[in-house]
Amino acid sequence: MPNIPTPQDVALFAKSVKKWQQVLSLGDWRIEKGMKPAKAAMASVEFNDIARLATYRLGDFGAEKITQESLDKTCLHELLHVFLHDLITVAQDPKSSQDEVDMQEHRVVNLLENLLTRDSNEFK
C-alpha cells in the first residue's frame, strides 16, 4: 500500500524547503515543487542550471512513517543535493579551471565551518 504524503505533509515539506534554503545559503536558487511524483524514492530533485531552478518531487515513503521529523530530514537530504550541485558540476566539467573547483569547494567548506562551529560549545 502506498505511503504518499498528504496535502498537509506537502505543506510541511515546503516550509522545510524555505528553512533549509536559508540555512544552506541557497538564495540564488529557485526551489519549486514539481507536479509529478518522485519515482522509487521518498523525494528527488532535478536541476535546470541555466534558470538556477531546482525542482523537488515527493514520492512514496514506503515503510518510513511520515512525520514532521521525517519530512524535515528528507527535505534536508534533497537540499544538500542542491547545495553540492555546483561543486559537482564544476568538478566534473573538463573545461573548469582548478580555481573554479577550489572556489566551489571553499563555498561548501566555509558554510559547513560556520554551521558546525556555531553551536560547537554544546559538544564540550
Image (spheres, rainbow, N blue to C red):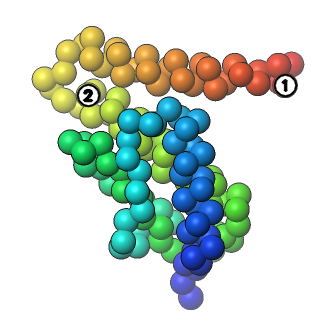
Note whether 80 is above or below 4 in the view shown. above
Q: Report x, y in % for residue 62.
A: 57, 74
Q: State the residue lying farthest toward the top.
A: 99
Label 2: state its secondary structure: helix
Instruction: Please give left or right for residue 122 compared with residue 13 in the image.
Output: right
Name the one closer to the observer, 51 or 1: 51
Q: Amino acid at mark 2?
A: Val
Please, is residue 78 above or below residue 21 in the view?
below
Say the numbered circle drawn on residue 90: 2
Is 111 displayed left or right of 85 in the figure?
right
Name the residue carrying label 1. 122
Quadrant occupied by the C terminus:
top right
Query: Dot 2 surroundings within 10 Å: few (below 14), some, or many (20 or more)?
Result: some
Left or right: where does residue 64 sit relative to residue 29?
A: right
Please give the name of the residue rendered at 50% of the width and 20% of the height, measured from the top-left corner: 109
Q: Residue furthest bottom?
A: 1
Q: Quadrant of the N terminus?
A: bottom right
Q: Marks 1 and 2: in contact by CB < 8 Å?
A: no
Q: Quadrant of residue 102?
A: top left
- The answer to whether residue 74 is visible is no
Amino acid type of the residue that numbered disc 1 sits on in the rendered structure: Glu
The crowd level at tag 1 (other Cα within 10 Å; few <14, some 14-19, many 20+) is few
Q: CA distance from mark 2 to mark 1?
A: 35 Å
Tell me what residue is drawn at x 60 percent, y 53 percent. Answer: 16
Tag 1, which secondary structure?
A: helix
- Which circle marks residue 88 in the picture? none
Instruction: Give the image location of residue 19, x and y in percent.
Output: 60, 45
Q: Is residue 83 above or below residue 4?
A: above
Is residue 36 or residue 89 the one in the foreground?
Answer: 36
